[in-house]
Every structure is written in C-alpha cells, then in structure tokens.
Amino acid sequence: MDTFENAPEQALIWAKDGQGAALATVVQTWGSAPRRAGAQMVVSGDGEMFGSVSGGCVEGAVVVEALEALEDGVPRLLEYGVSDGDAFAVGLACGGTIKVLVESIGTAMPIDLLEGLVAARASRTPVAYVVDVDTWDRRLDHTGHTARFVNGRSGIEEDGHSFVAIHNPPLRLAIVGAVHIAQALVPMARVAGYDPVIIDPRAAFGSAARFPGETLIEDWPDEALAEVGLDTRTALVLLTHDPKLDDPALHVALGSDAFYIGALGSTRTHAKRVERLAEAGFTPEQIARIRGPVGLDIGAASPSEIAVSILAQMVQALRRPA
C-alpha cells in the first residue's frame, strides 16, 4: 500500500537544528528495484538516516555520497545495480537498477523550497517537486502533471532531464453510517491504503466494540465532515439510508473536492435523493457526482460483497476519473 513517508519533514528538522541534511530520492528504476521512483531517505550531518531508497541494498553507499554532498554542496545523480544476491537478501526474486538523486539542504536544495514542500504536505495539498538534472533548476508545481498526480507516479519526463517527484496526501475514506457494510469496508479500505474515519451520531452504531481501533466521530455528518475536510484524496461513502443524515453530508460533499461520493440506496431512493438536492439548489452537474446506487454492479448481495463493490468503484474513480 502507499505510505506517507516523512523524509522531507525530517530533513527540514535536521537542517533547522544545524545538523545538516541531505535528501536522497529514487529518480528512476529498472527491473525489480526494491523501491519505486519517489521513495526518499534523508541523511544528517552525523550520518543518521531516516527512510529508504533500496530496502537496504545500497543505503550505505548513499549515506557516504550524502555526507560528501553536505561537505561540498554539489547535487549528485547516482546509479546502482542491485545484484541478484542482494535482491534475494531483501526478499526480491531478481536484481534491478536504481538511479538516486542526492541533494543537500540549504545548498543544492534551497531551504525555502523545502519549507514550501513541507507546508503543502501538511495542508494536504498535492504538490510536485520538479528538478532539471542538467541545469539543477528546481520548482514546486501545484498544477499540471495530471496523470502523475492521479497515479501517484514520480519519474523522469519524456524530455529525459526533468524529474517530477509527486507528493500526494495519504488517501482517506469518510464513512457516514456505522452499519454492517461499514464493518466490512473499513478493513478492506485499510488494506488498499486508505485511512478511514467513521461518522455516526448514533452511539450504539459507532461504538469501539464494532470498530475496534478505528477513528469514530459521534456527531452530525455535516459538522463532522467540516471538521474532517474533504479534499482531492478523500472518498466519501454514505451508508445510512436516512435523509436526515445523508442529505446534510451531501450538502457538504457536493461543494468539496472529494474524488468520490457514493450513497447507498435503491434506484428509487436515489431518485428521491436527486429531487431533494435539486430543490435545495444543487445543479445537475453537482448531483451527477454522486455514485448511486453505490458500488460497481457486480451482483453484490451480502454486506461484504457490497463493500467489495464500493471499494472497486472508489479505485476506479481514483485511477480512471471520467
């Protein structure tokens, strides 16, 4: 699953503490390289490291290069071949090759650029760090790179010298209605890389016994969603069947950037929902964002099967937006 790694944040901490920091980023991979493009590791001036660029194969060599980069301030573009033996040691079937960019903070990478990157990540704003490995020009892009943002794919552009590191916020799933389908959907969503939050003002439904270890908000959906926030990396699923709960949530969601909005209910239930939203002043384009009846039509019957259909539709909306 995707993980939200904190190498940029740690680099900023070390740089501001005066320890010095160098960021190492996987730029390109071939074969069965251990980490995908965009994976990062940060090295302090004392040789302490955080994160990983190869699962253990070449970290030692990268640390040496990072310490040298901290000395001379010169960025480095390194290439390593991972042998079959080393690959086997970290659980891979065969070897591969990785290209790693090493940048010292404050010399190669301006600290204000790193601060902007960290601020964007903290505010859950998708951002791309773009560096020209020929001229070493750098910038942060908040627009463009649509396909890369959708797929979360960092890499070298077709021009052969522009590296784009995608920094997407972690995926979230807000569920309104702590019903049986939610009990099946939450663990499935976690496996798929989502951080779920369950919203239900009915304490008997949204209990820790029914959802052990999960984030539960016992509040009205509109108030809870205003607190949670719905952005481009958030999916919303409404499972209550109750207009008193679903409609206020939809009023918030239809004005948000949530990439997926799904609502449980039959075709007739959804038609009535559409009527109510139109009377409330929402446009046909806004209302059309709702996936209702929720889930892909796979003939799902049980709560677990319905959860599968919902998760599949979420993935489709994220990876293949209309």
Image: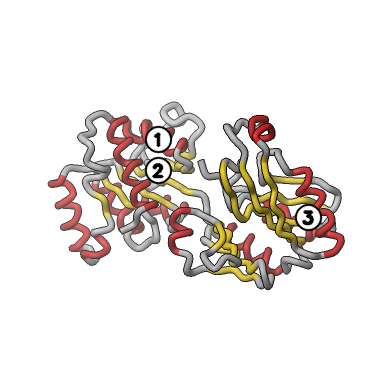
Of callouts 2 and 1, the N-terminal one: 2
Distance of label 2 from label 1 (alpha carbons): 7 Å
Nearest the eye: 59 or 50: 59
Q: Residue at x 44, y 26 (%)?
A: 209
Which amino acid type is shown beneath numbered disc 1? Gly
Q: Residue at x 60, y 43 (%)?
A: 33
Q: Which residue is mark 2?
A: 199
Q: Which residue is mark 1?
A: 206
Distance of label 3 from label 1 (alpha carbons): 41 Å
The disc label shown at residue 14, or none: 3
Left or right: 316 with respect to 16?
left
Distance of label 2 from label 3 (alpha carbons): 38 Å
Q: Residue at x 57, y 62 (%)?
A: 164
What is the tally of numbered marks visible in this picture? 3
Q: Please identify, in this view, whether the residue under mark 2 or under mark 3 is nearer the observer.
A: 3
Q: Are marks 2 and 1 in contact (CB under 8 Å)?
A: yes
Of callouts 2 and 3, the N-terminal one: 3
Which amino acid type is shown beneath numbered disc 2? Ile
Which amino acid type is shown beneath numbered disc 3? Trp
Q: Quadrant of the C terminus?
A: bottom left
Q: Is residue 32 above or below residue 19?
A: above
